[in-house]
Amino acid sequence: MYLYLDGQYVEEKEAFISPLDHGYLYGLGLFETFRTYNGHPFLLDDHFHRLAHSAEKMGIVINNYRREDVTCIIEKLLKLNSLNDAYIRWNVAAGTGEIGLSTELYTTPRIIVYMKSLPQKTLKNKQAKTLTIRRNSPEADYRLKSHHYLNNVLGRREVGNGTDVEGIFLTEDGYLSEGVVSNLFWVKDGVVYTPDLTCGCLNGITRQFVMAVLKKKKIRVEEGKFRLQDALKADEVFVTNAIQEIIPIHIWEQCRFPGNNGGMVRLLQSDYAYWKMRLWSKNDLLLNP
């Protein structure tokens, strides 16, 4: 597989990083995961807007985002890897420095773009499992999509490698947070609920898209602190991420839900299918008449 590494396109076996990179030594690194649809990188502007804010939090100085530059890299990698569409991870590591914690800005970060083929099977439903391990506190005042992933790895180990089961984190105080690789939503009496960002969940790009769709359709959304029983009493439950899209939950704690027969899920999946080859940002959706 070919990678993009600091301006060069190299085969995976030829890609190396310095042992003094602080992305490796101290976890000072960030990434965005997204995919393409017929070559279009869905919600690319939103991914890079989040990346820029996260880099600022970490003291990593990155070049101003230019859509044309990013899409050029993606197109070249698709061609080199003989892929029509792909799973893409855009990674920013702090760069090399002395051993020891630094208070200085990182002005020469390392950019690596990974690409792999997409899963062949599309998930129609998932089972949810409440994790015993609790969601850790965010790295800053809100969660960054950073290299700090041990909590997620431990959550995945608890539920196993099957993609049809999603582990759901609770906070230390027992509030719902998010899935191991997803954001959590549920529906009750026509209102859509989701944990707010004080519950330690990532402000996922697909999460933001779903909330923009609901706002456009004038469907009420409630963000807040909720208990497990609030979700288990729901009419529908679903999870979201940028690769798997919008996936309904059909069973959780012996409670059964309509899964892909749920009306809200079908509505959102239909909108996702319509916009996935059109949108660069959720803001375009809100501005579109």
Image: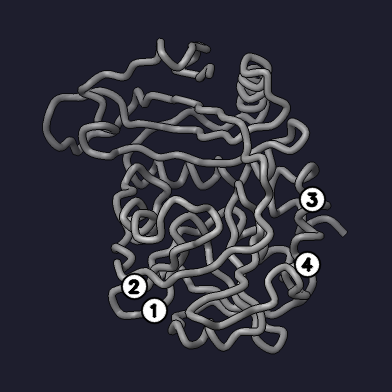
Q: Kindly identify which residue carries mark 2.
A: 171
Q: Could one spot residue 192 in this view of the protein?
A: no
Q: Residue at x 74, y 74 (%)?
A: 262
Q: Secondary structure at mark 3?
A: helix
Spatial CA span between label 4 and label 3: 14 Å
Q: How many marks?
A: 4
Q: Kindly identify which residue carries mark 1.
A: 175
Q: Amino acid at mark 4?
A: Arg
Q: Is residue 171 left or right of residue 64?
A: left
Spatial CA span between label 1 and label 2: 5 Å
**How was the colour assigned to the protein in this rendering?**
one colour
Q: Are marks 4 and 3 in contact (CB under 8 Å)?
A: no
Q: Are marks 2 and 3 in contact (CB under 8 Å)?
A: no
Q: Are marks 1 and 4 in contact (CB under 8 Å)?
A: no
Q: Which mark is residue 275?
A: 3
Residue 249: image location, x then y, percent: 60, 69
